[in-house]
Structures are given as C-alpha cells and as structure tokens.
Image: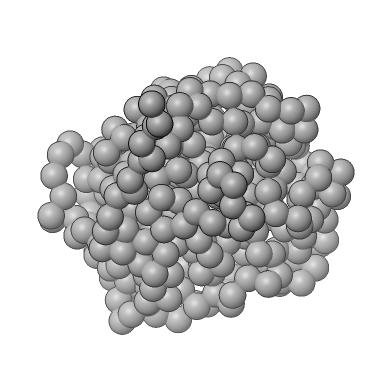
Amino acid sequence: MQKIRPVPGKNGDKYIPFEKRTGESSVVYFTRDLSEEGLKKIYDKVSSVITGKTAVKLHTGEAEGPNILPRPWVKELLASRLPEASIIETNTYYEGSRYTTEAHRKTLEINGWTFCPVDITDEEGVTTLPVNGGKWFTEMHVGKSLPTYDSLVVLTHFKGHTMGGFGGSNKNIGIGCADGRIGKKEIHTAAGSSNMWSIAEEELMERISESTKATIDYFAPHVCYINTMRNMSVSCDCEGTEAEPVVTPDVGIVASLDILAADNACVDLLYNLPDGGGKAMIERVETRHGLRQLSYMKELGMGNDRYTLIDIDHDDAEITAAEAVKDIKPEWVPDRYNTFWGRNKH
C-alpha cells in the first residue's frame, strides 16, 4: 500500500496573542543586560539541569559574519561556568565557508572560536536519533558525536532567517544539529527535487521542529535554552557579510528550560516593541510562515506557549512582554562589539 504523504499545517503567518493561548505555563527569564555579566547571570537561572560532558550549541557563523554572538561573552561564560564544555557545530548543506570540515576549521579560526574545543559533530559521519510522534520523520540524521554528550546548552543568536522566518532555539538545534549531507537534505529538499530548497513555509517549519524534537528528547532533562536578542538582522548568520543590515533594536536575553516558551517569548517581545521597532522582523517571520514553528512545537508536546516572564534585573519580578520592552527606542544602536569587518581578528 502506498504511504499517504503528510499534509502540512496552516496559519504559519498568523500571530496568536498571548491572551488567546491556552494550556500550562512555563518560566522564562529575561534580562536587558547584553554583556558577559548578563549572559552569566541568566545562565545561572537555568544551569541546574546541566551535568557531565556538556555541549554548547551555537551558530559560529560564516567567515567575518558581523552579527554572530560576541566571542568575549561565550569565552567568559565557558571559562567561569563550563570550563570542560565544547562548542558543537555541523557542516553546512550549502557550499560556503563551512561546507567541508577543513574549510569549517579555517572559518572557526577566522571568527575567533579558538578559546575552547569545537566539535564538528559530523566530521566522522552520522548517526540517527528517533523522532517520537512526528509526521515527516521517524528518525533524524545528526552528527555522529552528538550522542556522546550528557547535557546540551542551546546558546542562540535570535535573528531572522531567509526561509524559516526567525532563527531561535528551534532552528539552532533543528537545522544546526542535523548533519550537513543527509539530515539537512531531509529537512530542506523534497525527494527527487533538483531544487535543494524546495521545502518551504509550514512544511519546512514542521520538519525543523521534528528534527529538534529528536535532539531535545535525547538530552532531556539535561538541556536549557538561551536566546540572545541582539543584532537581529532579518538574515541568518549563514549569510555572513551578505546579511541584511540590522534595523531592529536590541532587546535583551531570554532563557528557559522550555524551548517553546523561550522562542515564543522572543517572538512576543518583537510584536510588543514600541513605535514599530519590530516591523522588519515581524514581516520576515510572517512572510515565511515562521510562526508555524511555534504552533507545531506545541502540537508535538515540546513545551508551552504560555509562560511567566521573570525580570532578573528587578528582583525576579513578574512582567509582561510589553513591560519588558516599553522603554526601547525603535532605532538600532550598535554596541561596543560592533566593529564589523575584521571584528573577530582583534
């Protein structure tokens, strides 16, 4: 009997306001302190689940990418909190400066990721992790060394994405942990298609989310999520120096033990930015139907889209997303880490 092809969901371009959501709530922490100290402080709020051999998944970026996480932040976090941890990455599906392991290693050096071990997890091949409850996959191909770790810190540069709409923790894991040749192809390319980017909109969001579920189910409960809302170009760090200029104002850092709550909080913060500050990112999210990432994660039981937002800058007071961003001006202002070209050589 021929297998019936799954049908993607709908409404990935429709934002659901917080007050219209139902179900349980999770805790999400928030700080406006975009610095080494802010990152360490918010990590401490979610670090209790991290034990043993630890992987830190972040986007190390194409060569000279201007918007990647500042090296000093990550260096300080690892030195003070995770001295034995390794950054983990995978090679890319597209032919860029991280397509092969050799090229990837050179790019890591250019971008300054030289202060700790960096494990390109698919360097020695691939393995599979089961996808429980998925409709597109029963398993996902990931880097072979990924399951050798005990805990996972998902340290994400929250930004836009050309096809995903936005890149939060879900994209960082779903695409970033899938290996460069098989897993990423399974996510992006329809069987038999000559167009490597033939899967888009709701189906793409669902495939990304199922890939993520395979990884976080493996690590649960030893996984936490930190989203840094800084230098939020509508382009992903995959685009390197070709990324669209940043226009969205910096917001802060979000952390949670719930991936859906963390990503949804970031999206809510964008929608609540005063004076149209979130316009560019919101347009990118909606035109790519990226909100399907959130609704499908909820359908898969990956977390809650309701949450209590805790302001760690003010004695852990409970606040709303609107209150968190009420004083942010609509224009982006570069910080002291933004020297752009050649930045990482300093």
User: What residue is drawn where x is 45% and y is 27%?
Assistant: 138
The part of the image, by quadrant, that contains residue 16 is bottom left
Q: Give the mark count.
A: 0
User: In front here: 261 or 344?
Assistant: 261
Q: Is residue 257 visible?
A: no
The part of the image, by quadrant, that contains residue 111 is bottom right
Q: Position of residue 103 (x, y in %)?
A: 84, 49
Q: Is residue 273 visible?
A: yes
User: What residue is drawn where x is 31% and y is 64%?
Assistant: 13
Q: Quadrant of the C terminus?
A: bottom right
The answer to whether 86 appears left or right of 97 in the picture is left
The part of the image, by quadrant, that contains residue 186 is top right
Image height of 97 relative to 83, above or below: below
Q: Position of residue 217 (x, y in %)?
A: 43, 25
Residue lying farthest front?
1
The answer to whether 87 appears left or right of 231 in the picture is right
The answer to whether 100 appears left or right of 145 in the picture is right
